[in-house]
Image: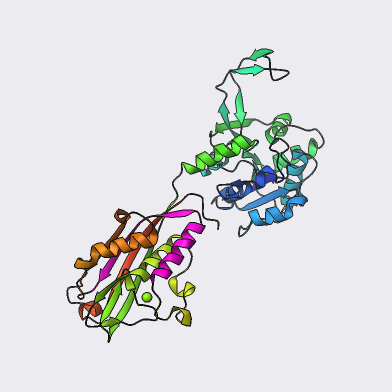
Amino acid sequence: MTDIAAVIVAAGRGARFGGAVPKQYQRLAGRPVLRWSLEAYSRHPRVRSVQVVIDPADTALFATAAQGLALRPPVAGGSTRQESVRRALEALASDPPHLVLIHDGARPLVAATTIDAVIDALARHQAALPALAVSDTLKRSDDGTRVAGTIPRAGLWRAQTPQGFDFATILAAHRRFAGEEMTDDAALAERAGHAVALVAGHEDNVKITTPDDLARAERVLAAIPDIRTGTGFDVHRFSAGDHVVLCGVRIAHDRGLEGHSDADVGLHALTDALLGAIGAGDIGEHFPPSDARWRGADSAAFLAHALDLVRARGARVLNVDVTLICERPKVAPHRAAMRDRLAAILSIEPDRCSVKATTTEGLGFAGRREGIAAQAVATIACMSPIPS
Ligand code: MG
């Protein structure tokens, strides 16, 4: 298999963007712009290693953006982009990959398919880049207020990244032309006489240069639904008592349910479903049975806590569905009240909540009326991606 490394260039100061924080560390949908670029490569199955080049002044910002990702230690950038890229390539040279993809850290929305297209082109060419044909008429202006001329757009393309190369070829070009500043890495390959292939770029692979670009990237991400689902399951056994609590509703019964809290098996399953949807562990972790605080507790507090965690991650509950599994008590007369109670705890419309019941035809522990089981599903929508 071809050994592929990525170089992500994030050492720029972004003078055109303004603000105290460099543009690659500005937040995009709740996470640093650079985080998106880092994930695009570190999660790409064909990329073995990721070498980032940063400004040492941004070390703390980078550590936050790179948290939890397996990357090579960052390299300190030089005084120009070209010098920064060369340093990253030199860092890779001790264990050289076959191919290298050089990517702007400020292009957060690069698609895996674009990365694939560049890699595929490198099977036939020593260099390749994604590009888009220029469709707007091009005007030249010397002062930004008056047109000085029209430039024919035929044959003009907008270059994006990643720009992909045979590693030895681009390293040699960078060494040879060190100090001769060129606008991108492909220009070095062209200068060295290598053919550079064009592959299809993507309009969403925008380079964040101005606050308008950041707003546009936010709109692109907002258009991609991030829907998540979690499931929960719980069982409580019957013991002596005169009522049970199911989905927040107290029901008179000739037995009670055993448990540390109010033993609301429905709310427990649902709490686990919400926690599952955000990857936040399970109910036992958040409310250990060993903790005296939860003795006899209203399980609505558990569900409300899980809801808080969902909201803290920028997500909202789309719908929940609980199935209670028991022979007795009869659930049907209480279903509407249960659904309304779930809607109230979750602050969502009742038609986004469902409570169903079934028996097990006399089979198993539920059939023998030894206890009640519940299963639940919760679906949530993330307005911004859950930070990992
Ligand atoms: Mg339980």
* 315 magenta-colored: yes
Instruction: Tell me, yes or no, if residue 308 can be seen here.
Output: yes
* In the image, residue 144 above or below residue 292: above
Q: Is residue 275 above or below residue 129?
A: below
Ligand 1 is in which quadrant of the figure? Answer: bottom left
Q: Can residue 371 be seen in this view?
A: no
Start-end of magenta stretch = 298-326
Q: In this view, does 181 lie above or below 30?
A: above
Report the residue that reaches farthest toward the top.
149
Estimate the x, y position of residue 57 in percent, counting from the top left: 77, 51
The residue lying toward the viewer, choosing from 46 and 329, is 329
* Residue located 41% across and 66% down the image: 303
Q: Where is residue 169 in the image (x, y as percent from the top left)?
A: 70, 39
Q: Is 340 in front, or is 109?
A: 340
Q: Is residue 154 left or right of residue 237?
A: right
Indicate the position of residue 127 as horizontal and vertical percent values. Answer: 64, 36
